[in-house]
Image (cartoon, grey):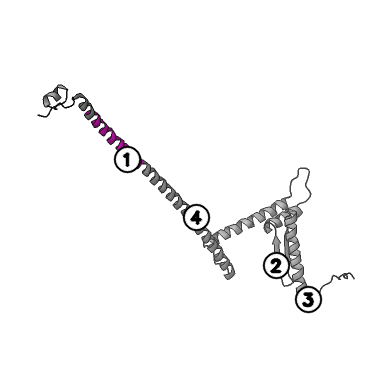
Amino acid sequence: MGRGKVELKRIENPTNRQVTFSKRRDGLLKKAIELSILCDAEVALLVFSPSGKAYNFSSHDMDRTIRRYRNENGQHKMNSQGVRTIEVWKNEMDEMKKTIDTLEAKHKHLAGEDLSTLGMKELKQLERQLRIGVDRVRSKKWRLLSEHISLLKRNHKTLQEENSILQKKIKIHELLGEADENSGLESSDHATQRLIPDGRPESPLYMNQLGFPGNS
């Protein structure tokens, strides 16, 4: 058998009414979320319980969506030039002023100013926001420091390698210079031996005749 149709009327039992409210509220919020995701729709849902507690969901900024709704429904028919009515412009300016005032108040609170208007709940929320902000700043700072240290280490390693290459080049240059000097001395000795006949004494007079300085 099919399920019978439920008669829509106020539930008299407070407990049953609260249970039904919770179930239907959760189902409504779920449908709103699905609609915004599946259809890429801008959805804003606002529900007040019988006790006055507010429940809301917004796929975008709630204030912006409400402002857009007011603009769309608050304006009269466009005239031939498509000019909005003065009332619509006034409402939009009022909303912008409220937004500016709210942002300025939040800025003062974050700077530690004008805290006398905040209660314990607001102060705790502000403290949590500041703690999160400080943690993010510290994380960013340490990340930048780590990257800078890594860069310095890489530069230091590069300089060490370049210095090692220069030291090797200097050593090779010195060795080549010594080799050239030794080669010149050996060549002079060989030439002298070729000019002196075998078995003939290397007398000073004979060496002078060959053009070599003799020992006095």
| Residue 111 x/y as whole percent | 52, 60
- Quadrant of the image for the N terminus? bottom right
Task: Tell me the element at label 3.
Answer: helix
Q: Is residue 92 left or right of residue 153?
A: right
Numbered badge on residue 52: none
Query: What amino acid is labelled 1 in the image?
Result: Lys
Query: CA gap, disc 4 to disc 1?
Result: 42 Å
Magenta residue check for 128:
no
- N-terminal-most mark, 2 or 4: 2
Closer to viewer: mark 2 or mark 4: 4
The image quarter containing residue 188 is top left
Kind of residue indicated by mark 2:
Ala
- Which residue is the site of mark 2? 54
> Alpha carbon of mark 2 to alpha carbon of mark 3: how far?
20 Å
Earlier in the chain: of badge 3 and badge 1, it is 3
* Residue under pointer 1: 171
Residue 77, x across and y down, in percent = 79, 49
Ranked by sequence position, the earlier of labels 3 and 4 is 3
- Mark 1 burial class by Cα count in 10 Å: few <14, some 14-19, many 20+: few
Disc 4 marks a residue whose amino acid type is Arg
Q: Quadrant of residue 29?
A: bottom right
Which circle, 4 or 1, is nearer the viewer?
1
Specify start and end residues of the magenta stretch as a single range: 166-188
What residue sits right under mark 4 in the picture?
143
Q: Nearer the viewer, residue 130 or 202?
A: 202
Does residue 27 appear in the picture of this structure? yes
Q: Which residue is mark 3?
A: 16
Q: CA distance from mark 2 to mark 4?
A: 42 Å
Q: Are marks 2 and 4 in contact (CB under 8 Å)?
A: no
* Mark 3 and mark 1: Cα distance apart in space: 96 Å
Q: Are marks 3 and 1 in contact (CB under 8 Å)?
A: no
